[in-house]
Image: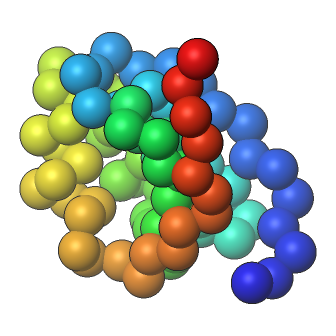
Amino acid sequence: MDKQKPIEHVPVRSSNIISVGYDKDSCILEVKFNGGGLYRYHEVPKNIYEGINAVDSVGRYFFQNVRDKFRTERIKWYYKI
């Protein structure tokens, strides 16, 4: 895994997703899930990230526009306290 600078996240209203972050220079989208995973999606266009912040259903948008469409990397597994 490349050394990647930390990506700032913003919270979202979703039953499955806690927050999302985007690095415009590397086109990396990070998604932190309620279930305990932090994932990076590579080569994501900026308009996809902007769409996440503009929809009523973040989870539905994610599953329709991101999941299984971009190279994915699990960054870490964490435990909610």
Q: Is residue 46 left or right of residue 52?
A: right
Q: Is residue 22 left or right of residue 51?
A: right
How many labels were placed on the picture? 0
State the quadrant of the C terminus.
top right
Q: Residue at x 27, y 32 (%)?
A: 16
Q: Position of residue 64 (x, y in %)?
A: 12, 56
Residue 51 visible somewhere in the drawing: yes
Q: Nearer the viewer, residue 72 or 47?
A: 72
Q: Position of residue 33 (x, y in %)?
A: 41, 39
Residue 71 drawn above or below residue 76 = below
Q: Position of residue 5 (x, y in %)?
A: 87, 59
Q: Position of residue 29 (x, y in %)?
A: 53, 56
Question: How are the colours assigned in the image?
Answer: rainbow
State the quadrant of the N terminus.
bottom right
Please identify the quarter of the rendering in which residue 80 is found.
top right
Residue 29 visible somewhere in the drawing: no
Residue 35 drawn above or below residue 44 = above
Q: Residue at x 36, y 77 (%)?
A: 70
Q: Residue at x 39, y 52 (%)?
A: 47
Q: Is residue 74 left or right of residue 15?
A: right
Q: Is residue 56 left or right of residue 3?
A: left
Q: Residue at x 56, y 34 (%)?
A: 79
Please identify the quarter of the rendering in which residue 10 is found.
top right
Please identify the quarter of the rendering in which residue 50 is found.
top left
